[in-house]
Amino acid sequence: MGGATERLTLLARAWDEAAEEYERYFVPRFAPWVDQAVGAVTGQPLPPGQILVPCCGTFPELPALQAGFPDREIFGVDLSAGMVQIARARAAGSWNVWVVEGNAATLGPEWTDACAGVVSVFGLQQLPDPAAALADWAQALRPGGCLSVVFWPTEVESDGPFALLSQVLAAHRPLADDAWQAQLGNVLAGAGVTIERDEYLSFPMSHEHAEAFWTAMTSGGPLRSVALAEGDEFMGAMRETFLAAAPAGQWNHMPRARWIVARR
């Protein structure tokens, strides 16, 4: 398998295993970012067309999208069968909602110029080529359509569990290539959309203690794929290092995500 294909296969397996814990632990904590991303699309006039949510995960965007667009078709796309199963349960009984198990990194030609709105929260940064995926999503918009995407940047915080986790991993794994993040303005312009917002959103987050955060990240978060790739011995060493450097007791922090809103 090539690099991108191998990475997608690993991501799908990891999120299959993580889906239930992600829904339990992270969906409530990520809700403020979801609300902002969806609100950018529901809070303004849109052309006719469907609403697309690439990398929908367990589909936490769905309730607000249904409230804002009760008469439109809403589609979620996710690579993970485990995520799709929970998303379909969330959509059960809805006549206008479909959840597709598929690769949201590259949309098919049937999506081009088909969508009034595209919303995605915390999926973009996981893809093998995020800039190309964002351009693909933008090209799915009809004239007047709105794109609202939230993703984790390289530096989520300067102090807190995400910052410490990055430091611990950076000492043992190659740093991820983050050059794509500086390319997004040009990528979106090339896709024929105009950026209306490009800013950072911070909201408070809390964890009972460092162990709870580590467990959630490894069983229901992005560290699940690291665990599958590196094995138990590596993860055990990382856990010891992380917990030794972490503060005791409840851990409160203010992570920031990057938010881009664009219109065709």
Image: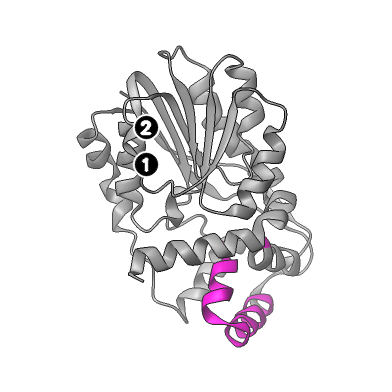
Image quadrant of residue 179?
bottom left
Frontmost residue, 260 versus 79: 79
Secondary structure of the residue carrying numbered label 1: loop
Neighbour tally class for label 1: few under 14, some 14-19, many 20 plus, Cα within 10 Å: some
Neighbour tally class for label 2: few under 14, some 14-19, many 20 plus, Cα within 10 Å: some
> Can residue 111 be seen at all in this image of the molecule?
yes
The residue lying at 63 percent from left, 83 percent from top is 232
Start-end of magenta stretch = 220-244
Image quadrant of residue 117?
top left
Q: Which residue is mark 2?
A: 111
Q: Please, which residue is most extreme toward the bottom here?
A: 233
Q: Is residue 139 left or right of residue 202?
A: left
- Magenta-drawn stretch contains 223: yes
Majority secondary structure of magenta residues: helix
The residue lying at 29 percent from left, 44 percent from top is 184
Q: Which residue is mark 1?
A: 107
